[in-house]
Amino acid sequence: MHIFDSVQKTKREFIPLEEGKASLYVCGPTVYDDAHLGHAKSALVFDLLTRVLKANGYDVTYARNITDIDDKIIKKAAEQNKTIKEITEFYTDSFHKEMAAIGVARPDIEPKATESLEAMFGMIQKLIDSGHAYATAEGDVYFDTSSDSEYLTLSKRVQNEDERQERVESSSLKKNAADFALWKSVKDGSLTYDSPFGAGRPGWHLECSAMIEKHLAKPNAAFAVDIHGGGADLLFPHHENEAAQTRCSSNHALANYWMHNGFVNIDGEKMSKSLGNSFFLKDALKEYDGEVLRFYLLSTHYRSNFNFNTEDLLSAKKRLDKIYRLKKRLFGLAESSEPTAFKTELLKALSDDLNVSSALALIDEMITKTNETLDTAGKHKELKRDTLANLSFIEEVLGFGVKNPFEYFQFGMDEATKEKIAELIEKRNEAKKAKDFESSDKLRDEILAFGVSIMDTPNGTFWEKV
RNA sequence: GGUGCCAUCGCCAAGUGGUAAGGCCGCAGCCUGCAAAGCUGCUAUCCCCAGUUCAAAUCUGGGUGGCACCUCCA
C-alpha cells in the first residue's frame, strides 16, 4: 500500500515500524462547539484509512484525541453559564453521535487532555532538563525553538527575520519569537491545574506529543508512530511543534508518515459561521441520510479541497442509490466467501493513497455489468453469490451500503405516510389489474406527491424517496 | 511579503511519459399499458505560450487564473 507523505511530498510505500502492525494518531476535535463538515471530512478520511489498512492485513491501533482543555471551552462555559465539564461532555457526546451517523467507527484509543496531564508534565520536565525548554519569571514554560536545529524542517518554513524581530519585542519574556508555550501560567481560577511548574494550563501542542508517547510509542523504534494525520491547517504550527517536542524529549522522531486532508468549503466559500446551517454536521444530518454525506464527502480525493454544495451532493446520492438498488435486487440471497477479482481490484485502488475515485469507477462498472447480466434470462446463481460478496466488501472497506436497502430508500418518512403510500399502491394495483389505467395513473400521481418514485417489478411495486 | 497547492467534457472527478476512467445532467433507443428502475448508444485531447522527447494532460521555463497556510481553525 502507498501513502502520500505530506512532509516528504511524495507517495511512499507503507512499511510499518513493526511487521504486520500499523499505528495511527490523528488530531481530534476541541470540544467547545458542534462538529462541522470539516471535522466530518477529517474523521471520514482516517476512518477510511484504518479500514484499508485492516483490509491489507494490518493490525491497526488508531488513536484520536479529544481536546478538553482550551480557552474556547472556557469562554463558551462562561457565555452559557455552565461548567467546563458540562460543555466538554455535551460536545464530546454529540461528536460521537454525529460521527456514528456517518459511519465513522470509534478509534481504539481516545485520550483526553484532562486525563493526560501526568504525561504532559513528564514531557515538559524532560524538555527543561535537556535544555530545550525554559520557564519565565511569570511562570510560563516555553519550548526553545533555537535549541532545535531541526525546527521548521517539517513544514519547510523559512523564518522571516523582520517579523521575528518585531515579535520578540512584543513578547519580551520569550527568548525567540517562534517559541511556543508548553505550560501557561494561569492564576485567575477559571481552569487551572497544579503542576510542578505552578498552577496553569498546558499549551495546546503538548497534549498530542504526550499522548502519543503514553499510548502508542514503541521503545526502540526510529519513530513514535507509523502515521500521524490531521487537517491541512495543522501542519504549521501544530504539527511542527509536536514534532519538535517529541524529538527533543525522546530518542525518536514523531511519525514516519504524515497525512493531511484538504479543506471543506461551502458553495465556493470558506466555511464561516455567518453561512448558517450547512456549516454544522448536525444540520446536514437532518436533511440527508448520514451515509449519503459519508459517500459525498469521501467521493473526492482526501488531499484536494472539497467544495460542498447541494447539487453535487444529490449527484453523489444517486450514485449511492445504485449500490442500494443492486442490494435490493439481490436481497435475502446467500453470498460467496470466495475471493473475487473485483475485491482485489477495489482494494488495489484504495491502497494507492486512498484513490476513492478509481474505486467508485470500479464499483459502478461492477454494478452495470451485473445488472446487464441479471437482465438476461437465467438464474445466474454464481454471479449473485459473488456480487453479494462484492457488496459486502464495499461495506467493509468503504462503509457504503451498510443499511437495509428498503429502509435506506425511506429516509425521513414517517409511519403514517408509509402506510398511506402502501394503501394507495394497493388501490393502484387493483386498478391496474382491472386495466383501468386512467385510475391507476391518477393514483400514481397521488403517490408521487409524497416526494417518492414508484417502480413496478416482477416482485411487486416498490417506492423510493426521491 | 514568505511558503506551498491547484487549473482535465455543462457540473463533479480519476489519470505523473505512450496516444483521455467513472458519475450527474442531456439526447436517441430497448424494456414498460404508460412510467420508474435497469440496459444500449452518443458527447473533451486535458488554461495559454515556448521547450525537452520517437512519444506529454502527465517533465522544464514563462504567463494567466484560483486557493491555502504564515493569527493555538479539521
Image: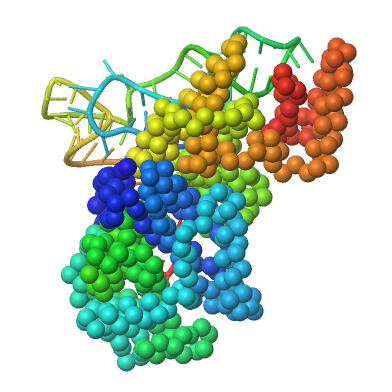
Q: Is residue A336 visible?
A: yes
Position of the C terminus of chain A, as image quadrant, is top right
Residue A174 sits in which quadrant? bottom left
On screen, residue A301 versus residue A222, left or right, reads right
Identify which residue is drawn at 46% across, 90% down.
A187
Identify which residue is drawn at 30% across, 83% down.
A125
Identify which residue is drawn at 79% across, 32% down.
A449
Residue A437 sits in which quadrant? top right
Q: Work out whether residue A34 or residue A104 is closer to the camera in this orientation and state it.
A: A104
x, y percentage for residue A217?
A: 32, 65
Q: Is residue A312 visible?
A: no
Is A339 rendered above or below residue A129?
above
On screen, residue A175 versus residue A32, left or right, reads left
x, y percentage for residue A113?
A: 46, 73
Residue A348 sits in which quadrant? top left
x, y percentage for residue B4?
A: 27, 51
Is A137 rendered above or below residue A208?
below
x, y percentage for residue A124?
A: 32, 80
Identify which residue is drawn at 57% across, 77% down.
A84
Q: How many marks?
A: 0
- Colouring scheme, one of rainbow, by chain, secondary structure, one colour: rainbow
Q: Work out whether residue A91 or residue B42 is closer to the camera in this orientation and state it.
A: A91
Position of the N terminus of chain A, as image quadrant, is top left
* Residue that lies at the very extreme toward the bottom in this rendered image: A137
Is A27 rendered above or below residue A71?
above
On screen, residue A403 versus residue B19, left or right, reads right
